[in-house]
Structure formats: C-alpha cells, structure tokens
Image (cartoon, rainbow, N blue to C red):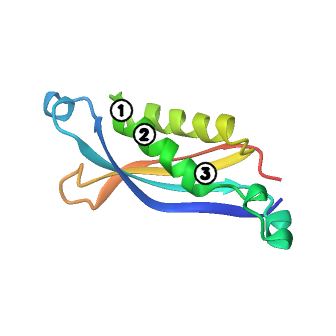
Amino acid sequence: MADIVYIRELEIETIIGIFDWEREVKQIVSLDLDMAHDISKAGQTDDIQYALNYKSISKRLIGFIEKSEFFLIEALAESVINIVMSEFSVPWVKLRISKPGALRGSKDVGVIIERGIKD
C-alpha cells in the first residue's frame, strides 16, 4: 500500500516541557502526520465510509493534547502515534511534532517518529 493520508501543521495549545514556567503556560505544538491508508475504494465509490476520516483524527488529537501535560515531546509523540494506530486502525504512521519558538534562534524543535508497517 503506497497511499498516504496526511495532516499538516495541526497546531494545538498544551502544557509541555520540563521547566517550571512551561508547567504554567500553555505552548503551541505543531503536528504533521502521514498515515498509510488504502484510498482506492474511497476513490472508486466516492463514499466517506471507505476513507480515513482526517477530521475525526484531528478532533481526537486536539482533545487529547489540549488536556495533556507531558514533560517530554517524545512521550507526547508516542501517545499520539498509539491513538492514531489503535483507534483508527492505521497500520503505519509518520509523525513530526514540534514546539515552535522553544529554542532561541530556531524556528522550531521537535521529533520525527515512524511506527508500524508500511506495505
């Protein structure tokens, strides 16, 4: 399967970080998701039931991340991947998650992780 459904620059406010001030002020995290999904049946039928519903995924992730209070972006990334794979039956996910403005002189910092099997 070579089909990818993606979400780019999904920005969500959350508590994230190890410093005292980061535990008191919400910061923006930005997500890029690439998700394996066979889109052929959705393309042939024009029926949403065969598509990977990126709106449902984004709403679920927004709700989860807004309420979360992780210290490390790595832990947040693993949780995001687990939600996408387990709740939406996605066999492979690549996630880029960043904290814009977290490092002076840099546009953003973050991690890129990939989990699952991409056919």
Indicate the secondary structure of the residue bearing disc 3: strand
Q: Do callouts 2 and 1 mark residues in contact (Cβ within 8 Å)?
A: yes
| 1 or 3: tag closer to the N-terminus | 1
Q: Please tell me which residue is depicted at 40% across the width and 38% down the height of the picture.
A: 65
Q: Which residue is mark 1?
A: 67
Indicate the secondary structure of the residue bearing disc 2: helix
Give, as a three-letter code, the residue at label 3: Lys
Q: Please tell me which residue is depicted at 43% across the width and 45% down the height of the picture.
A: 62
Q: Please tell me which residue is depicted at 19% across the width and 34% down the height of the picture.
A: 22
Q: Is residue 20 left or right of residue 46?
A: left
- Marks 2 and 3 sit apart, C-alpha to C-alpha, by 20 Å
Q: Is residue 78 left or right of residue 39?
A: left
Give, as a three-letter code, the residue at label 1: Lys
Coordinates of residue 79 in the picture (x, y in percent): 52, 33
Mark 2 or 3, closer to the camera: 2
Indicate the secondary structure of the residue bearing disc 1: helix
* Circle number at residue 59: none
Circle 2 Cα neighbour tier, 10 Å, few/some/many (<14 / 14–19 / ≥20): few
Give, as a three-letter code, the residue at label 2: Gly
Q: Please tell me which residue is depicted at 49% across the width and 48% down the height of the picture.
A: 59
Q: Which residue is mark 3?
A: 94
| Pick the front one: 68 or 56 | 56
Q: Quadrant of residue 14?
A: top left
Q: Which residue is mark 2?
A: 63
- Marks 1 and 3 sit apart, C-alpha to C-alpha, by 23 Å
Circle 1 Cα neighbour tier, 10 Å, few/some/many (<14 / 14–19 / ≥20): few
| 2 or 3: tag closer to the N-terminus | 2
